[in-house]
Image (cartoon, rainbow, N blue to C red):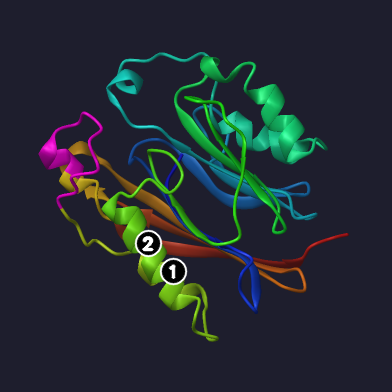
Amino acid sequence: MMCVINFKLKDDPKYKLVIAANRDESYNRPATPAAFHGDILYGTDEVRGGTWLGITKTGRIAMITNVRNLEEMSKNSPLSRGDIVLDFLKSDDTPEDFLMHLRTESKDYGGFNVLLGDAESLYYMNNYDNKIEKVTEDIHGLSNASLDTPWAKVQLGKHTLDTLTGNIELDKHTLLTLLQSKEKTYDHNQHTGVGESMEYNLSSQFIELEEMEYGTRCSTVILITQDGNVHFVERTYDRGKFVFDTEFNFKIEQ
């Protein structure tokens, strides 16, 4: 799953959509870097076969984070959250129709937040309140609580993205710098049941927990221009160290 998603929807002279997101996972869980599978671009979780983020050549996009709390730590859910992203990207359903169907079976998944739609409009839902929301045209942040929950890492991401997108030279490098921030803070809004020390270690954009063999496995940047050009960058890490970038450029098909 993605563990922090910073994004700006429209409200920008150059870009319809800007996404900067990190996926945190066990270092030992196998995954395949982003690649096109037919018309869909996504990385693959080799354990369950799903994905955390993807985009199609026609511009459909979906991304998901997990919910972190004590209930989820002891929950054994039959369905894979990563399938939600792929199911939407493979379907022709409108976002609203897809989410209306999803909420009929949402309790069969572990806790999740899902964002889906396209560069014109995004929709959000979690499987705690099952409320479907159209995302406003603004800067937003999503981590392991609900959309725009004011955790310090979310607030920092939103503030930094706001600053960066005011720069006409915005590119992958500036967004990847945001995603590689290891700035931590004791966040009194971030109480998920893992203890104060762990909350502190999970309060940065980029996570490294060597003793737990867990941390940020990849960063993804997506820039979609007003004329429909997509620049997709996925940066892969091995135990916190840069390995390689995977990049794709294409124009959204009408």
On the image, the x and y values in percent for residue 7 come to 51, 59
Discs 1, 2 touching: Cβ within 8 Å:
yes
Q: Nearer the viewer, residue 128 or 204?
A: 128
Instruction: Please state the extent of the stretch shown in magenta in the rendering.
Output: 186-199
Residue type of the residue flagged with mark 2: Gly
Task: Tell me the chief SS of the magenta region.
Answer: loop
Badge 2: residue crowd in 10 Å (few <14, some 14–19, many ≥20): many
Q: Is residue 45 above or below residue 165?
A: above
Residue 189: in magenta span: yes
Counting labels gives 2
Residue type of the residue flagged with mark 1: Leu
Res. 161 mark: 1
Residue at 39% over, 49% down: 217
Q: Nearer the viewer, residue 188 or 170?
A: 188
Residue at 51% over, 20% down: 109
Q: Secondary structure at mark 1?
A: helix
Quadrant of res 96: top right
Report the residue marked by disc 2.
Answer: 157
